[in-house]
Image (cartoon, grey):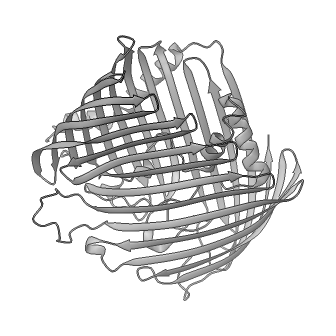
Amino acid sequence: MKRPPQAQRARLAPLSGWLRLALCCLAASPVTAQTLRADAEVTTTATATNNSRYSDSGDRPSDLVLDVAPRVRLERRGARLDLSAEAGLNALHYTGGTRPSRVLPEGRLRLRSEPVEQWVHVDADALVEQSATEAFSGRAELSSSVDLATTTRLRLAPYVERRLTSSLSLLARTEHDWTRREGDELQPDQERVYQQRHLVRLARQPLPFGFDAEWSKEDASYGGDSVSALEIETLRAVASYAFDPELVLGVIAGHERSSFFGSTESDGLYGLRLQWAPTERTALDAVVERRFLGTGWQLRWQHRSPFIAFHLSSSRQPVVQGTSQELGEGGGDVASLLDAILTTRHPDPVQRAALVQDMIQRLGLPTQLIGPVELFSNYAQLEQDTTASIALLGRRTTLTASVYMRKLERLRRDDDPFAGVAVGTADSEQRGLLVNVNRRLTPTTQGDVRLSWTQVEGLGLLEGSRSREKALRVSLHHNLSPRSFVTFGVRRQLLDSNVSGPSQESAAFAGLGHRF
């Protein structure tokens, strides 16, 4: 559990070495048969608001906010290299001086490389985004810098994956994840998180009998701590049987050692695993296990057709930061849902990505669906998270919607005699819903209505704290040309909070955008 200071410094500052490794892997990938797509856009928005600070009714300064947002995107696909990158910023200027002007960066990078064919792989992900620093103060809408922190994440995962025989495969993977948050309201021990995960798995494909034998280890710490906030080491065996090619059922047995809050214990685990893919468009993966924390699970259900895409995920697991901060592939944004809908009609991924971005800009669709506010603690937590998102694509109407529930509590063992004692300082339960309806009114004009509702309730030492927020946004989006557009709209937000106080805001906005 203890790490010497020198080893700790080496662990927290390996970034340049890992990046050099990633660049070497990128250089080693073949450059033939590559598909490249690049585009850029800039959007300027002026927002007149009657409450620029989104504060309580006793302090509601009006202002005119100017927002200039350039953005660039790059997609490159090849036989052994996939690269997707997006970078931009929001330059905000409060003409009335009610808040300081700020430049807020955003970006995302995803790299999948295979330096040695069918042997060595390197995955790399990077994320820079703006997120709320506090859940009970509501969420400021677009063209605002209220209550924001800049979150930067980098994940690097080199691994070896090899098929030993026609049915037997080996995987050895190490994953390193750095997170840093910068904001005025953050405590020093909430600003940095380091996680590492290691996995070795030997798997036999169920024909019809199969098995998995794996060893895994997870380790996470906050700031410059020399003691891990959470460490879990697991040995797991899975015996599986394929009833048919679409349905596989597995029985799980294993042992895990867990360390957190200065306590280390060993426990057995057992459970079931289900893999069901009735068609190529529908897939369900589920794992349920009895663990030291009680019942844990991981569930993922995806369905797509030429007109609808649906994603559902649910989990109960120990964490040191929320799962929506994870950098893997997901279905929580509009682009991934539209990409799933267009998969059958446009199988080429680069061409499909271009069509998705064109559709989002042409229709004026939102880019992100609603999700829980990330509440960073300085201790390990038990997270129960469920998120569902859907997109319906009609001839003239596009509907996107999402719903979520997340409960975060201080991590305890299932047999903890003090399970009912409130000690968590960042425990909460969040729920939310968003519905967005986009309707084509003319060949070049679309109407858009967006309604959202969120609720946050404190748990543990925050018991009694609550916040409820409702927001309505109505806009018109008109395409001046295939690459230029204007947007006009209004919004209304209502916040009821016994922590920050009640607040409300009304605003009107106009925007002009061009894609190069």
Left or right placement of residue 48 versus residue 2 in this view: right
Q: Splitting the image into 4 quarters, where does residue 160 fall? A: top left
Along the line of sight, the residue nearer the viewer: 503 or 188: 503
Q: Splitting the image into 4 quarters, where does residue 475 fall? A: bottom right
What residue do we see at 51% from left, 26% from top? Answer: 112
What residue do we see at 45% from left, 13% from top? Answer: 118
Image coords of residue 87 (percent x, y): 61, 42
Image coords of residue 63 (percent x, y): 68, 75
Label count reads: 0
Image coords of residue 427 (percent x, y): 31, 66
Along the line of sight, the residue nearer the viewer: 47 or 262: 262
Q: Is residue 300 visible?
A: yes
| Quarter in which the C terminus is drawn | top right
Q: Is residue 142 visible?
A: no
What residue do we see at 32% from left, 43% from top? Answer: 194
Give the vertical position of 225 relative to 78 (above or below): below
Give the vertical position of 48 relative to 124 (above or below): below
Q: Splitting the image into 4 quarters, where does residue 145 fall? A: bottom right
Q: In the image as oriented, which residue stretches furthest toward the front?
A: 243
